[in-house]
Image (cartoon, rainbow, N blue to C red):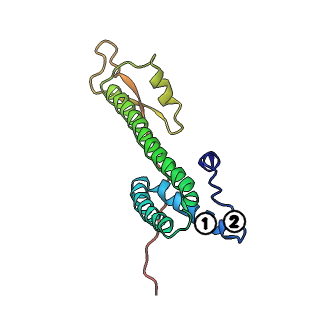
Amino acid sequence: AWVDDRFNCNSFISVDGTAEAYLIVWVLVMLFNVYFPVIGIYLMILLNQVLRRSARRSIESGFTSDNHIWLPAMSGIFVGAVCMMLFTFLSKIFLDTIDTLFLCFAIDKDNNVDMSNQEFAELVKEIPTYTEAEVMSEDGDAETGKADAVLVPMPSAPPVVAVAVGAIK
């Protein structure tokens, strides 16, 4: 809308009611281009070339250009597609960082590294599916005769539903 105001385009103003149809088409194009940003940018390039040729022909024929109709919508769609690509990339980096932290936590836990005073161990214990379990190692303490107990997070499995399979007559 700011491009519309800045350049006095008056994109979606019409007397005959076609503005609503243009608006619906542009919203659908925008949703497609934001959902598939790479394909959307290529389609916007092709659509821009077609619309520029059409505007050039109308100017050569003595009519006014119709750039004011498609310029604000195309610029908004372009910004949306670029933002989608950027935020998708950044979210993948964030999720990979979280996966790496959990992998390092699992490796440290597997190697019996003491993590009792670390912030990440407290964060893992806050996960709803976290369950503490005692795991007895084979080599116990020689003096007391007790085995070492290590707390290991156990993932909770979904409940198993038994299904009876029989012949139907």
Secondary structure under tag 1 reads helix
Q: Nearer the viewer, residue 21 or 161?
A: 21
Taking 126 as reference, is 48 above or below it?
Answer: below
Please state which of the two labelled residues, at mark 1 or mark 2, is closer to the viewer.
2
| Residue type at numbered disc 2 | Ser
Q: Are marks 1 and 2 in contact (CB under 8 Å)?
A: yes
Taking 100 as reference, is 44 above or below it?
Answer: below
Residue at numbered disc 2: 14
Q: CA distance from mark 1 to mark 2?
A: 10 Å
Q: Quadrant of residue 110?
A: top left
Q: Is residue 165 left or right of residue 3?
A: left
| Residue type at numbered disc 1 | Tyr
Residue at numbered disc 1: 22
Q: Nearer the viewer, residue 146 or 106?
A: 106
Question: Which residue is at a point 47% across and 47% down the rendered structure image?
Answer: 84
Q: Are there few (<14), some (14-19), or many (20+) residues within 10 Å of tag 1?
A: some
Residue 105 position, x and y percent, is: 37, 28
